[in-house]
Image: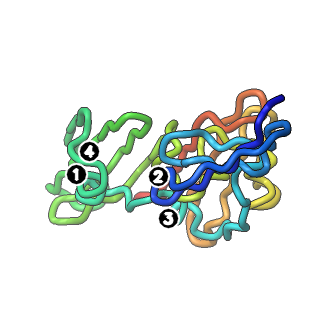
Amino acid sequence: MRSRCLRFLTGGSLLLTACSAGGANPDTQVSNPETESPTPGTVAIEPVPCEELELAILTVAPTRAELRSAFGEPDSAATETEPNRHVEGATDSLFVVHYPGLVVSIRKPEGGEDMADRVEVTAPRYIRYPWLAPGASAQQVEASLGDPTDGDPERLTYNCNLGADQPVTFQLRDGRVTAVTIEYYVD
């Protein structure tokens, strides 16, 4: 006879495991979004407003300082410079910062702050909502965010920012999220 177990997680630590006879029930299992991909029945899906999704979906702001504070030094970082498009004689610095499962492209105008240009996430730990993270199903994404702005079997795109074109795209394979890409409007 197989056992049915309930697992309770707090802050990523297992507190109690209680088992009884019977088949495993996936609706009672809890996943740890920092280490596991969500599976159907393990995450309570909540509605997330589509407006400003590009800001709310990440666990931290996509700046070099915030990333370093939350995740330590990056695995690698590349830097380039280019002339600023708006201020003659000014130079922008372009950074591409790599963490396991996260790539962030950042533009920093001369004398300005970090501005994320593009973020690609392939690991669940960087996404605030487990039901929108890599490993989630397309159904979980749509149950939370509603109908996409654009989509097909390989992607769902939500572009709900009223002031600028800042799409959040969920790349899909076999109905599951493999990557979340956020494009930020930078001018």
Q: Quadrant of the C terminus?
A: bottom left
Q: Callout 3: few (<14), some (14-19), or many (20+) C-alpha neighbours within 10 Å?
A: some
Q: Secondary structure at mark 4?
A: strand
Residue flagged by tag 4: what amino acid is it? Leu
Q: Quadrant of residue 90?
A: bottom left
Q: CA distance from mark 4 to mark 2?
A: 35 Å
Q: Position of residue 78 (x, y in %)?
A: 23, 34
Q: Residue at the location (24% across, 57% down)?
A: 69
Residue flagged by tag 3: what amino acid is it? Leu
Residue topped by disc 4: 94
Instruction: Identify the disc placed on residue 12.
Output: 2
Q: In the image shown, does 118 or 31 lie closer to the viewer?
A: 31
Q: Nearer the viewer, mark 2 or mark 3?
A: 2
Q: CA distance from mark 2 to mark 1?
A: 40 Å
Q: Position of residue 2 (x, y in %)?
A: 80, 31
Is disc 1 in contact with disc 4, using a CB cutoff of under 8 Å? yes
Q: Quadrant of the N terminus?
A: top right
153 vs 61, left or right, is right
- Lower sequence index among marks 3 and 1: 3
Q: Nearer the viewer, mark 2 or mark 1?
A: 2
Residue topped by disc 3: 55
Q: Position of residue 45 (x, y in %)?
A: 73, 60
Instruction: Identify the disc placed on residue 153.
Output: none
Q: Residue at the location (38% across, 34% down)?
A: 100
Determine if residue 132 is in view: no
